[in-house]
Amino acid sequence: MTDRYGPRGVIAFLIPQQNANMQPEYEALRPPGISNQIYRFELESQEAVEEAVLRALPSCHGCWPDLIVGGNSLEMRSWSVERQVQYREELREGAKDVPVINATDATEAALHAVGAKRIGMMVPLFESTAQSAKSYYEAIGFDVPHLTWLGIGHPKDSINVPIETIEAAFEEIDHDDVDTLLHVGGSLGVADMAERLEAKFNKPVISGIPATYWYALRSLGVEDPIPGFGQLLLRPSID
């Protein structure tokens, strides 16, 4: 339900308590007239994110949102296309009569929006999570010939990864045979790097947080370009 602080839309975001960058990034991307409402859940295990999200989902109704957003990229956690379909339905059931989207679907939509076919992929966690994400995106039709991971062991370490380390990881996956660079997930804080990285590599850079926020805005019919965060945020629609 729109309100005085969100006359164009109220968005409820479900994010882990341990992710320090997600809320500031959402706020940096917020256009006038949109209200960001943050709901945090305890993330006891990286393998139980979907259960934690579904348990916390009912609390989002407290701000009468126009849209609920699950901000985590589940494709890093032994995920499959079939599980994503099931999870999407579980989110809809838990959200009741409020529209709901999730970061995995948003990232797929973002890749299609920029015309991605062959992807260089970077994942913040470990090789197993990177391989899971690679398998997922290949299953939905993308080629992923180049893959790297940072080996971050604890959520508190994500926010303090040096910018130089992140940029070096993108350099590692940048090859002539890929058309798009992808950061899976939302824990690194890549949004404000995207424009500069796109200029450096001369190809789209997609990251979980900006992709999810773009998808959320466009799902609400908000078409404002959000400059300074890469070419995706300038696109007025999902199609």
Image: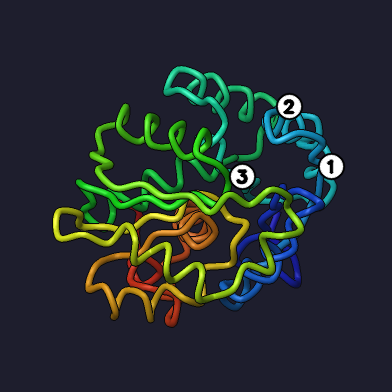
User: Closer to the camera, 216 or 96?
Assistant: 216
Which one is earlier in the sequence, the residue at label 2 or at label 3?
A: 2
Distance, label 1 to label 2, CA atoms, is 11 Å
Provide the secondary structure element on which disc 1 rests. Answer: loop
Residue drawn 79% across and 43% down? 61
Which one is earlier in the sequence, the residue at label 1 or at label 2?
A: 1
**The quarter of the displayed image where residue 167 is located:** bottom left
> Tag 1: residue type?
Glu
The outermost residue toward the left is 177
Which one is earlier in the sequence, the residue at label 1 or at label 3?
A: 1
Determine which residue is flagged by label 3. 72
**The quarter of the displayed image where residue 95 is located:** top right
Q: Which mark is residue 42?
A: 1
> Tag 2: residue type?
Glu
- The local crowd at label 1, few if under 14, some if 14 to 19, many if 20 or more residues have their Cα within 10 Å, is few
> Tag 3: residue type?
Asn
Residue 204 percent coordinates (x, y):
29, 65
Q: Which mark is residue 51?
A: 2
Residue 88 percent coordinates (x, y):
54, 28
Residue drawn 25% across and 38% down? 142
User: Closer to the camera, 228 or 187?
Assistant: 187
Residue drawn 47% across and 76% down? 193
Q: Which mark is residue 20?
A: none
Distance, label 1 to label 3, CA atoms, is 13 Å
- The local crowd at label 3, few if under 14, some if 14 to 19, many if 20 or more residues have their Cα within 10 Å, is many
